[in-house]
Image (spheres, rainbow, N blue to C red):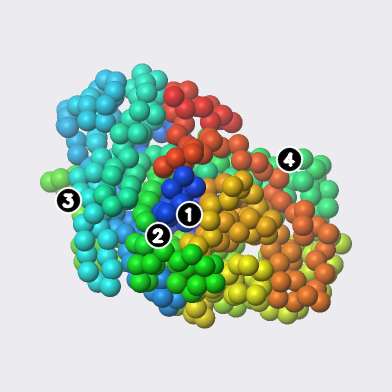
Amino acid sequence: MSSHREAPEISKDPVADNTDTYAFRSPDRPDTITLIANFIPLQKPDGGPNFYEFGDDVRYEIHIDNAGTGASDIIYRFEFQTKVRNKATFLYNTGPINDIGDETWNRPQYYKVTRIKNGTSRVLGSNLPCPPVNVGKRSTPDYAALSRQAINDLGGGRKVFAGQRADAFHVDLGSVFDLAGLRPFNEAHLISLPAMNGVNAVQSYNVHSIVLQVPIRDLTRDGSKPSSVDDPRSVIGVWATANRRKNRMFDPDTGRFEGIGPWVQVSRLGNPLFNEVVVPMAEKDVWNYREPRFDKKYEKYVLRPELQTLLPVLYPGVFPNLAAYDKPRADLHAILLTGIPAGVVPGFQNFNGATPADMLRLNVAVPPAKKENPLGLVAGDAAGFPNGRRLGDDVVTIELRAIAGLTIPLVDPTFKPDGAASAVTDGTKDTNAPITDSFPYLGLPGGGYQTKPGTTKAS
């Protein structure tokens, strides 16, 4: 998955596991940028009585690099606090929750948002309410209304939401991690099986989302709103992290773990699938700990990705040109580590400096697409991945095709991609809950009572 259980240690700590990061120019408010960081992967909607929630002992952060150094110039920090209203019951709620402030919700959660720029902190909002999870028709009879109540206005054209949503990512986990199987290409695999459509392993699962919408001027290095794609000020880098105290101790008086000592980064995510597919198993946990500005250590895995070597072996005869290609992958280096320089793709660039660093790179001067293409930039839609990342971008297919050689001609015109490079896919379609036309865009989460495997229906 994009970053669902992508490293051994963070897979044991799902409340701090950053699953997906998104950054895009808001389609309905194009003077703003929407930033999304998802956490707590693969939430089964009926996972009670202790339903999913953000960690009170975790600092969640969204980082902005607007100087091209791989370091944070702006940080948006989110800190959560959970209350227990009735300590005599085991129930999450003691009756229907018709309003976000109802006393029947026994475990409400609140949060604070702080903006940190060049070491100076400013609280944008505090004691902001999260919505409850979508328990079911009796407990949360009008979940859409509860969700709307959790959209908080921070002033100055800024909005924030933090709570449960439907996962927007789709991928065929069952096949991809079974010796890199791609069901539509099953018959060509070294271990042949009948060809079939992909199976979306994420369908009907929820995540916890932090969704922040801010004016473009809040994110650029000089507070400007660039109008030219070629303006170097128009490119920002975006990634998200989760941090824990260095030590944790259980307090028997409160019945909770308490953090002690300095904060330590335990999870991060910029480009989808980077730690998942590019970084070797033995280095994944250390990668989660490191800042992007130190990613030169991982440059070699981008220039010569393991999956490029595996595809011709697992699919004999399908990728002969890829098997023979022995040059460093300068195309992937640009896409994942520096941004795409001007002149490579006509009328587009999202280069933000020579420091190799894994992050989403968004050119804020590119307007939202009138009609989005899920294949983004490789299909001519410059508002899509790898120019930032939208909720509807099919990043699995985009990155598979890039690794299969489709983007090599951008930097090496002598290379002719194999025919399969433009067709390779995991075969899944976006069968998740529909994204919406307005903030917070992610679809409503599936409810515990009414959601069955293979469906996405929410109350």
**Vertical arrangement, residue 49 with respect to residue 215, above or below:** above
- Between circles 4 and 2, the one closer to the viewer is 2
Question: Residue 331: which numbered mark, if any?
Answer: none
The one of 291 and 376 positioned closer to us in this rendering: 376
Q: Secondary structure at mark 3?
A: strand
The residue where tag 1 is placed is 25
The residue where tag 4 is placed is 197
- Between circles 3 and 2, the one closer to the viewer is 2
Going by the numbered disc 4, the residue's amino acid type is Asn
Neighbour class for label 3 at 10 Å: few (<14), some, many (≥20)? few
Going by the numbered disc 1, the residue's amino acid type is Arg
Distance CA(mark 3)–CA(mark 4): 51 Å
- For the point 69% across and 63% down, the residue is 402
- Is label 3 in contact with label 4 (beta carbons under 8 Å)? no
Disc on the earlier residue, 1 or 4: 1
User: Viewed as shown, does residue 452 lie left or right of 133?
Assistant: right
Neighbour class for label 4 at 10 Å: few (<14), some, many (≥20)? some
The residue where tag 2 is placed is 216
The residue where tag 3 is placed is 251
